[in-house]
Image (tube, coloured by chain):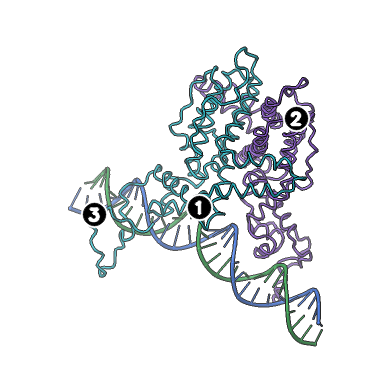
Chain colours: A cyan, B purple, C green, D blue
Amino acid sequence: MTDAVADTPATPPPSPWERERPTRTHSAPARTPLSRDRVVEAAFTVLDRQGLDGLSMRQVAAELGVTVSALYAHVSSKDDLLELMYTRLFDGFEMPAADPDRWQEQLLDFARANRQRLLSHRDMARISMAHVPFTAELLPHVEGLLAIFRTAGLPDRIAAEAGDLISTYIDGFVLEEGMWQDRAAQQGGASSPARPDWREMADEMQNYFASLPEADFPHLRALSGHMVTDSSDERFDIGLQIILRGLASYLPARPDRATPDDTPPDRTAPRT
Amino acid sequence: MTDAVADTPATPPPSPWERERPTRTHSAPARTPLSRDRVVEAAFTVLDRQGLDGLSMRQVAAELGVTVSALYAHVSSKDDLLELMYTRLFDGFEMPAADPDRWQEQLLDFARANRQRLLSHRDMARISMAHVPFTAELLPHVEGLLAIFRTAGLPDRIAAEAGDLISTYIDGFVLEEGMWQDRAAQQGGASSPARPDWREMADEMQNYFASLPEADFPHLRALSGHMVTDSSDERFDIGLQIILRGLASYLPARPDRATPDDTPPDRTAPRT
DNA sequence: TCATCCGGAGAACACTGTTCATCAAGATAT
DNA sequence: ATATCTTGATGAACAGTGTTCTCCGGATGA
């Protein structure tokens, strides 16, 4: 991180004699006292820059201009730090009051919001998959999710499983998304190492599928178009609709809207 | 790790004289010439004994009575080794010919078999989640899976997503299963470090849920019974049924069996 | 018998997470 | 004002990681 000592206004010049007293020759006075939140924040910075594999305690310390051991005063271990990052993801995320008439829209909103949350930091799905949301701060969220299922009228046996099902789906989908992203980035490295070269990768996959022998892989070839060209947002919603329809099939028959619509109510494509 | 060198049956006692000639003092003559398959096999042994976090190249080498660098003659990197382990999982696994009238049973069989496969080695779900099955050896499997969806009559848009959906579900479910298992094993360590102490853990979770304030967590408390006491096999099938029903809802209306049964056809509980 | 070759050995490099004794500076007490 | 205590960061160290390099010894071919 080079050296950024620009916050102490009048540092006396080192004057090569009087060499003793190495006090703060190498770092700023650390004006801000390095709280736990600052450690987590720096960890997110490193995560976004270098990915989960590049996220080491030493990198986080360097990001803060501090030694490694200093971190352990505020964080008990690296796993602890990852868990803090995981729960921090849910900050400012409120579950809606369950509305039996809008359970499908509420589930759609929940899933989309969570996906965006996972996408907001690199490799976040990998961190999410390694944790179970049964900590004190996160319990209200799973309660809110289960509330939607139960007040919608799903049998308890189904509702108990539905939470895991869609949470797993969201994490898994974003995880896979990130894997393609990484693969595209590391492969088209020479030309543009920064951006994933999305188009080029899609074409290459398309060509690969087209090169498969028609006799052995008819279905793979037939579906390659959807797998490659459909946007991630579309694909995410389709998988979600499958799950929602499955859940709806367990509802006691009601006169109005027994099954979800074929087209989601509002699709204001967030990003491509 | 302590010291476990008990695999060479008759190691001659070191006999401190005749100290010269360090030839093979520390390992068997290495009669078998260390093929790539032997490396993968040893990796599985280490994985089952020490878990993915304890699976290091040095441990694999020690398992074979060989130095680390010898492994790199047969395996290009640790990631390569993990990928070999991943594809080895599918050895001897044949996809059935897609039968439009039995697509649900075929999917159930596929999912259950894959779960058992993942359960056959410790932490295998973590390895599986990190890989995408688009290698040459694994493509026939995804082709066979897509064949089931397409010949069943699902729209292409849905079929293309369904493969990812259930694969993600299987991996995610087993991953979570393993996490609970690990947590139970490491927590009840003093009494019985080997076996997970399943009962004790279930009781503890039950008590934890029961201790939550009824006003804030009514649904969590109401569903805790299912989440804790229901067997993993049951829970796995329920999630699977939700997905299958969702898929079935996209089939063009057919006179017979439009939706899956409520009870799975045959439940010969494999293991508890 | 000699030359060749090649697979494994051993050491090294640059890292990782974590812990320890130390030490300067601020706050508090005398 | 002086002395003590507390706080929080330091630097070094430990054990372990993936990977690469040079080197050697024994099995092969001529």
Residue placed at 79% from the left, 26% from the top? Answer: B265
**Toward the viewer: B126 or D2?**
B126
Is D27 placed above or below B82 here?
below
Write down the residue under mark 1. A54
Structural crowding at the residue carrying mark 1, measured as other residues with C-alpha within 10 Å and reported as few (<14), some (14–19) or many (≥20): few
Could you tell which of marks 3 and 1 lies nearer the N-terminus? 3
Residue A262 image position (x, y, % from top left): 61, 25
Cα separation, mark 2 vs mark 1, equals 43 Å
**Residue B116 found in image quarter:** top right
Residue A9: mark in rendering:
3
Residue B107: mark in rendering:
none
Q: Secondary structure at mark 2?
A: helix
Write down the residue under mark 2. B104
Q: Amino acid at mark 3?
A: Pro
User: Both on one chain, marks 2 and 1?
Assistant: no
The reply, left or right, for residue A193 in relation to residue B111 is left
Structural crowding at the residue carrying mark 2, measured as other residues with C-alpha within 10 Å and reported as few (<14), some (14–19) or many (≥20): many
Residue A69 image position (x, y, % from top left): 43, 53
**Toward the viewer: C5 or A234?**
A234
Cα separation, mark 3 vs mark 1, equals 34 Å
